[in-house]
Amino acid sequence: MSGRKIIDVIVNPAAGSRNGGLFDAVVQQLHDEGAVVRCFETEGAGHATELAARCAQEAYADVIVAAGGDGTINEVARGLLGSPTPLGVLPLGTANVLAVELGQKLRARSVADTLLHGDAKLIGTGLVNGEMFLLMVGAGFDGAVVSAIQPSMKRRLGKLAFVFEGLKTWLKGPRYPISVEIDGMVDEAAWVVVTNARHYAGPFVLAPTADIADPHLQAFIFQKHSRLAFAGYFLGLALGHVARMPGVHVSRFQELDLSSAGPVPVEVDGDAFQNLPLTISQGTQFLRLVVPQA
């Protein structure tokens, strides 16, 4: 067999009910190709980071794989910062934004081929209150949606859970006034999304010029406070035209501070985070990520 021979897999046992058998099929494909596969199940929040750091310190595996959604991938990535061992992805989540970003097909043969033979490329990261993120930070609308979804609801409804809670949050109306300070310039917003990637919430293109391998973050500042305005934002996102819409300010930055008079919910890489205030900046460390073959 050519390619990687020893593969450690850190798996979130609750993720997408292991995505209709994708996890077992990928592991079987890896075994069939002659790879030695060790699987470690997470037991709670933060455990994936501990497992990844431990595996990286052992320096036994050729690749350490995050098997789960974008939140699990984030945790494993945190444990691999500064390590020469690359991160692999076995997408088992609801939105699988990173998999979409990489062009990874959700088929066992394709995922296994990537883990065995894909190139390991350096990618940029971001920092939110000193903690690493790979894809995005959302303050306001999407923070409220993610915070409202219980794990049991996500397992039962999948993507429909986000649609259901998104509709409920929209009907309540925008209610999160946010103060934004970008590199010393102050602005006001109803919703803020900071992204390291092109895609958002799965297949939707938010930032057409973004590149996860390019160490630049973009802030999308949605300024209008009304249900009608937010309906327009959602339509623009579906069409890939958000950056050109009135009431949307897009900026690259070195440091961004978000604050508010009241509690504003936040999501980071698809998982609920602490409320505002936040300080967001470009990450100081790169990560080696295994990507599909061209």
Image (cartoon, rainbow, N blue to C red):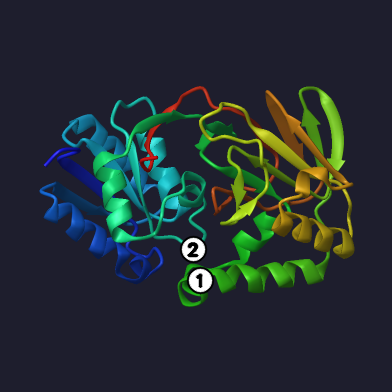
In the rendered image, the quadrant that contains the N terminus is top left
Q: CA distance from mark 2 to mark 1?
A: 6 Å
Residue 113 in picture, x, y percent from top left: 27, 48
Q: Is residue 141 visible?
A: no
Measuring 86% from the left and 64% from the top, which residue is drawn there? 227
Measuring 37% from the left and 43% from the top, which residue is drawn there? 292
Classify 87 as above or below 21: above
Residue 271 in picture, x, y percent from top left: 54, 54
Tell me the crowding category of disc 1: few under 14, some 14 to 19, or many 20 or more residues within 10 angstroms, Cα based. Answer: some
Judged from the image, the secondary structure of the residue bearing numbered disc 2 is loop
Please report contact status of discs 2 and 1: CB closer than 8 Å, yes or no: yes
Judged from the image, the secondary structure of the residue bearing numbered disc 1 is loop
Q: Amino acid at mark 2?
A: Thr
Of the numbered discs in the image, which one, if any, rests on residue 94? 2
- Work out whether residue 66 or residue 57 is closer to the camera in this orientation and state it: 66
Q: Which residue is mark 1?
A: 158
Residue 71 in picture, x, y percent from top left: 47, 51
Q: Amino acid at mark 1?
A: Gly
